[in-house]
Image (cartoon, helix red, strand yellow):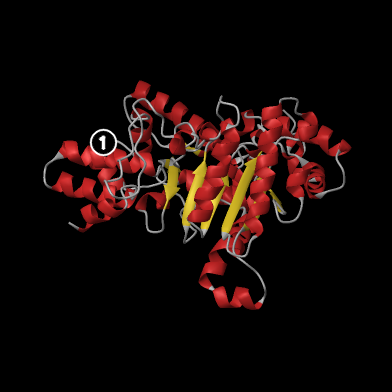
Amino acid sequence: MRAERVLLQNPMNAQAHLLLSRVHLAEGDRAKAIEHFESAAQIDGTLSDPPLERELGQTIRDARRTSPSAMMPEPPMGMGGDTMEEGETPTEFAEDPFDDPPYDWRPETFYAPGDPARFGVTFSDVGGMEELKEEIRLKITYPLQYPDLYKAYGKRTGGGILIYGPPGCGKTMMLRAVAGEVPCNYLSVGLHEIFDPYFGSTERNLHQIFETARANAPCVLIFDDLDSLAQDRRNVRESQLRNLVNQFLHEMDGMRGENNRVLVIGATNQPWALDPAFRRPGRFDQAIFVPPPDAPAREQIVSLLAKDKPISNLDAAALVEATSGFSGADLKFVFDRAAEMTLSAAIHSGQPVPISMDTLLAVARAHQPSTHTWFEGAREHAQHAPPDTYASEVRKSLNAPTQQQREP
């Protein structure tokens, strides 16, 4: 068999081991299939074969973790391999810091083009934020659709976008909707996939994340809660966090190459907590403020929230007027709370009743927008911040009449 001949010539060929694992599994020899699967995992922890992993009930990463001491296949006689004395350690692998867990990393949220799971949320499910949607298209969608036009203008795919604003205004939902819109690979990273108690492991994890994105370019790389990874070094005492920030800056600088077609999108509720070095051109040079939705955006969100709900005589305009300064999360609370109140009434009356506009308006008028706390903190930071994009956008929003504190 060709794969076996390949292994005779090169016993460290992980792809050949993976192929033999599939063959043995098809022939019903599960033990042999697992043996070759684990050999492939030990040789190359970046491999991926989802159908085979499902059949065997474990991932490549699982195989590396559960068999950390599994020996690599020995080279056949006559291949020039040195013989080892009993008890001797193969230093070629033992000294490699990325060979064993926890240094191997595989994404938990990765969507390839055409993956049906990625289309659960799209831009049509997100009310407002038209500027942000267009900026994402300009940096990753249009370059893939019109490569010659972008080349003529000297523009390239990728870059960095930072979205910031009060919580509950749709930043996380927008990040999820990107997966359903961009025609390329999508990689979203959680904080638990980066931070590690072992010294130096967190920086290695971050490096492997960027390496994975570059290896799968064109790709969108998502970081939510960016302030946890990019804290201002002037306020950080722990050397590990400072090293993480330095590593992040180094990885961002590495995205400037001609062939690194990766769009990095970060989201934060606290832009003032980020290290100023991230604001330099070539890093997160495009910063977009996501304020509480304005009246047209609230109308879109109301329509989305009201869809498929039993509401009698919905008056979207009246609800929009009663929810000035509300975030998307606040609007969702209004509908959820009104539904609970109506459900309670239906249970006690013994017959279903629709959600009334009076109930929706009563809940809206009794609810204080959750964004006020954020704006109070932002006001303090904006007063002492330098005159940059972050501070000016926050100041502008603070002075907007829609964000003023409502009378109780």
Camera-side residue: 393 or 233? 233
- For residue 380, say whether it is visible: yes
Q: Residue at x 40, y 41 (%)?
A: 310
Quadrant into which the C terminus falls: top right
Q: Residue furthest top?
A: 348
Q: Quadrant of the N terminus?
A: bottom left
Residue at position x 62%, y 29% from top?
A: 367
Q: Is residue 315 visible?
A: no
Total number of numbered labels? 1
In the picture of the structure, the residue carrying the numbered disc 1 is: 57
Element marked by disc 1: loop
Specify few, some or many for label 1: CA neighbours under 10 Å numbering under 14, 14-19, or 20 or more: few
Rendered location of residue 65, percent (x, y): 38, 30
For the point 74% across and 44% down, which residue is it? 402
The part of the image, by quadrant, that contains residue 233 is top right
Residue 184 location (% of width, % of height): 47, 59
**Residue type, label 1:** Gly
Quarter holding residue 227: top right
Residue 374 appears left or right of 347:
right
| 386 or 350, nearer to the observer | 386
Q: Is residue 210 above or below residue 348?
A: below
Q: Position of residue 362 (x, y in %)?
A: 58, 31
The residue closer to the viewer here, 103 or 268, is 103
Q: Nearer the viewer, residue 233 or 340?
A: 233
